[in-house]
Amino acid sequence: LFKDLPDFSSRKILPVQHLIEGFLVKGGITIIPAWRGSGKSWDAMAIGFAVANELPWCGLMTIKTAVLILDRENGEDILREREIALNVKTGDNFKIMDMCSTRKSFDIDDPELLHYVDEVKPLIILDSFSKFYREDENSNSLVGLFFDKIRVLKSHGATILILHNTGKSPNAQ
């Protein structure tokens, strides 16, 4: 099995594309872990708007890509307040789904979401990990099953950005 492996160093290196230069790999999975209340959701909205409109983000170049923010953390009033404060507008290429107030709730393996990913190849921002993953965060096997669902979206062309609330105590990191 191992003696027939090709020489790894002779393989052609394909260039890595970034939706945000040096930060967000196109077709990748990125997690932003930080304390609750540290501004992850604000940053995610700014990131989403910049990518959707090919605007620089923190001085970094972006590649125009459709963006879908799936929010189970904040609710409609907070999302609208941030949209106004950041002077961003939703539209065809930048969508926010308030999953706290909406009647339709679904999981990340919903066939409608997969169909959307197949058609659009978006950046999907999940806010936040703990609201989409409802199992024991310390169970490697259960977390692995959740990330299997994330990898299906990735394999269909989505780029995934996950916001994750970490604990503030040293034992909760």
Image (cartoon, helix red, strand yellow):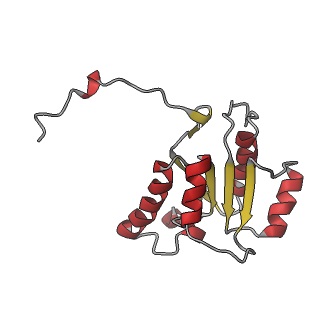
Q: Position of residue 43 (x, y in %)?
A: 72, 49
Residue drawn 12% across and 33% down?
A: 4
Q: Is residue 100 above or below residue 15?
A: below
Residue drawn 59% across and 37% down?
A: 23
Q: In the rendered picture of this protein, how many numbered marks are placed on residues?
A: 0
Q: Position of residue 158 (x, y in %)?
A: 55, 49
Residue drawn 40% across and 70% down?
A: 142
Q: For this view, does 98 lie left or right of residue 111?
A: right
Q: Is residue 58 above or below residue 89?
A: above
Q: Position of residue 106 (x, y in %)?
A: 60, 72
Query: Residue 77: which quarter of the image?
Result: bottom right
Viewer-proximal residue, 105 or 88?
105
Q: For this view, does 72 lie left or right of residue 91?
A: left
Viewer-proximal residue, 25 or 155?
155
Q: Is residue 166 visible?
A: no
Q: Is residue 16 above or below residue 97?
A: above
Residue drawn 73% across and 35% down?
A: 54
Q: Is residue 61 above or below residue 140?
A: above
